[in-house]
Image (cartoon, rainbow, N blue to C red):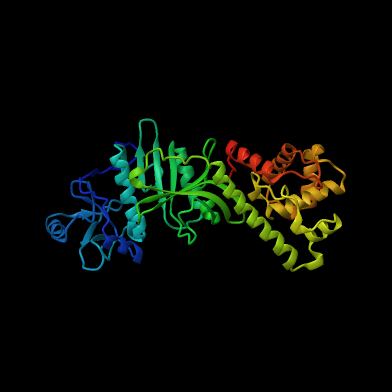
Amino acid sequence: MLNDSENPPNTGGFFSCNLSHKLIEWIKIGGVCILTALTIKNELFILSISHTKEKLKQLRRTHKFFCPQCKEELQLRIGNIVVPHFAHKKDSNCPQLFSDGESKEHLIGKQQLFHFFENKGLTVELEPFIKNLSQRPDLLLTTQNEKFAIEFQCSNIPIEVVQARTKGYMNASIVPLWLLKTPNFKQLTSTRIQLIQLSPFRQQFITCHPQHGSTLLTYNPTTATFIYYSHLLFIHGYRFIAKVQQLPISHQHFPFLHLKEPTKEEFAQYWQFHLHIRQRFLSQRFYLSRKGVQDRLLKTCYSARMRLDQLPLFIGLPVRNAQYIDVYIVEWQATLLFFLQDCQISILQVDDEVISIFILNNPNYFQDERGKEAIFHYILLLKKLGIHSVHCSTKEANILQLLHSEFLAKCYEN
């Protein structure tokens, strides 16, 4: 039993993870409840759909149940509309009312994940209080060598809160694992390669692995399924191209499985998504720019005697750290190449000083120093393609082959 948790309760063998259609509907309609309580023997009692109302009414007559946090006595409510649940009494002094403010998706998800780890033969605790941190993870998992704090996050919380909790766990030598509830993407289909949108809140939970690339792992408690958004390729703003795959909880392992890298055929789909977005940007900017002849990018292309919607494909290459540049990749890469042309500098001559001057000339493009790394990566790709100036040319197949090898060699960091 862990030394860091305060009075860790024993499981009383009441747990079940099977969901009926009624419970799934209950998850969907929203509401508030508590599904866990302590018995007078300090055993953890977890309500499940397998408990009949008659059995629960008998337990209510013969047992007392207490809040795992404040230790106040709880009421076991057994009605005809909402599934059985625990609730604090009206005059409760519980400082946080424990799980009372949690969604049912969150509560059921924790149930399922608790059962998943327990079935793997791992030591797992549900909502333990870690005294020296004053934090209560959803699950605390202990293996032979490490402890893991599992946070199943169903709602947006301030980034500062996430960072503070993560720092607290790490300072206590506990590995934090944040697992988001699967977003309700309208475009989620059976197609594996998809264009998705990730808010800044969700982007902070993207993990990067040297062999397996960048991944956002989510969980859907309604279907008891893990959804992987893996090998993420940043496009612009909130948009990413990702390999999407569903994995039933019964097929999951721990440590969590990684997806295989995209095949050449799958990466070709990445490329087609990229080309579609790129061409749409170019056409809209060329035909619909609100600035008209004052549009800086259009003026630059005009001066170079090039049509914006006919720029070569090596302008607009996906690169690492592109998310730290506030304009779309086509715009800053075109601006860079025209800048080099005006300065009569070959791509082979580009160094840190040249890039620093370019950044000074375009301060509104860059968020911080990480944007410089995106430029260096772009210059490296151009050199590998044999591109020395904006007027060079190369075959699309060469670009696709290079990007695929770069994509597999190193994830596009987030």
Left/right placement of residue 295 relative to residue 260 reads right
* Residue 237, position as x, y percentages in the image: 61, 56
Please report the residue visible at 83 percent of the width from the left and 46 percent of the height from the top: 340
Q: 87 and 340: which one is in front?
A: 340
Q: Count numbered badges in the picture.
A: 0
Please report the residue visible at 68 percent of the width from the left and 51 percent of the height from the top: 325
Q: 370 and 210: which one is in front?
A: 210
Please report the residue visible at 44 percent of the width from the left and 47 percent of the height from the top: 178
Please report the residue visible at 35 percent of the width from the left and 52 percent of the height from the top: 224
* Residue 19, position as x, y percentages in the image: 27, 55
* Residue 217, position as x, y percentages in the image: 46, 47
Q: Quadrant of the N terminus?
A: top left
Q: Residue 328, can we see it?
A: yes
Q: 135 and 309: which one is in front?
A: 309
Left/right placement of residue 280 relative to residue 131 reads right
Q: Quadrant of residue 386?
A: top right
> Looking at the picture, does residue 186 appear above or below residue 39?
below
Furthest residue in direction top, as rendered: 145
Q: Quadrant of residue 412?
A: top right
Q: Residue 128, can we see it?
A: no
* Residue 102, position as x, y percentages in the image: 36, 59
